[in-house]
Amino acid sequence: YSKDDKQRPVYITEGHSLSESLVEQLRFRSLTDEELLVAVYIVGSIDDDGYLRRDLESLSDDLAFTRGLDVSVAEIERILHIVHELEPAGIGARTLQECLTLQLNRLTLDTRPKRLALKIITNHFEAFAKKHYERLMERLRTTEEEFREARLKYKTYCTQIWFGHVFDKYLRPH
């Protein structure tokens, strides 16, 4: 800087955490106070990778002991589906299969490879994970090229939803 330049402070912001962003999105939903409390509790139980690794029964017990709320597992499941509708796609999934299914369900399934990818993940995930590709192609009556296109379609999705400390840095599937 020269003597004539006016020094200005430089502000550095980190953005929103994933949790803060999810809670903010929940506030735009038409939820009762109790539903919002349960949804926020679910969000607070999501790990740094964006997964909900705790079983719903444990969440129900925790809500009873810490918040004095008697919430059934079925009700927590219903509210978890609301959390699944938030951004980023796949948030709150309990397994890789559920994460990919949630992400693929956000796509417009306008091509055969997209529909095939969803069918593979939804109905044949274990065989796919074990790389039984030939058996899958035979079972799905698809060509090797169509199968490869479907594989590439879901491979573009991130399996780790949350990659850093700043919400603005997470990778969105294309």
Image (cartoon, grey):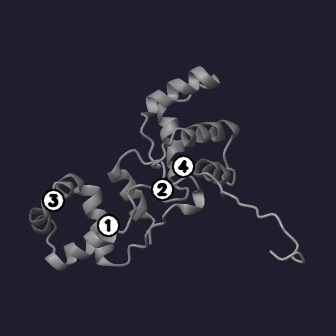
- Find disc 1 in the rendering and name its residue: 155
Cα gap from disc 4 to disc 2, whole angstroms: 19 Å
Q: Position of residue 99 (x, y in %)?
A: 39, 54
Dot 3: element: loop
Query: Considering only order in the chain, which callout, 4 or 1, is on the residue closer to the N terminus?
Result: 4
Q: Quadrant of the N terminus?
A: bottom right
- Find disc 3 in the rendering and name its residue: 131
Dot 4: element: helix
- Find disc 4 in the rendering and name its residue: 83
Q: Amino acid at mark 3?
A: Lys
Q: Residues within 10 Å of mark 1 (few under 14, many from 20)?
A: few
Relative to 101, is 2 above or below?
Answer: below
Q: Which residue is painted at 53% across and 56% down in the image? A: 85
Residue 87 in which image quadrant: bottom right
Query: Left or right of 163: which side holds 21?
Result: right
Q: Which residue is painted at 43% across and 48% down in the image? A: 93
Q: Nearer the viewer, mark 2 or mark 3?
A: 2
Q: Residues within 10 Å of mark 2 (few under 14, many from 20)?
A: some
Dot 2: element: loop
Q: Is residue 97 visible?
A: yes
Q: Residues within 10 Å of mark 4 (few under 14, many from 20)?
A: many
Cα gap from disc 2 to disc 3, whole angstroms: 27 Å
Callout 2–callout 3 Cβ contact below 8 Å: no
Q: Amino acid at mark 4?
A: Val
Query: Considering only order in the chain, which callout, 1 or 2, is on the residue closer to the N terminus?
Result: 1
**Considering depth in this image, is 142 or 97 the residue closer to the camera?**
97
Q: Quadrant of the C terminus?
A: bottom left
- Find disc 2 in the rendering and name its residue: 163
Relative to 146, is 82 above or below?
Answer: above
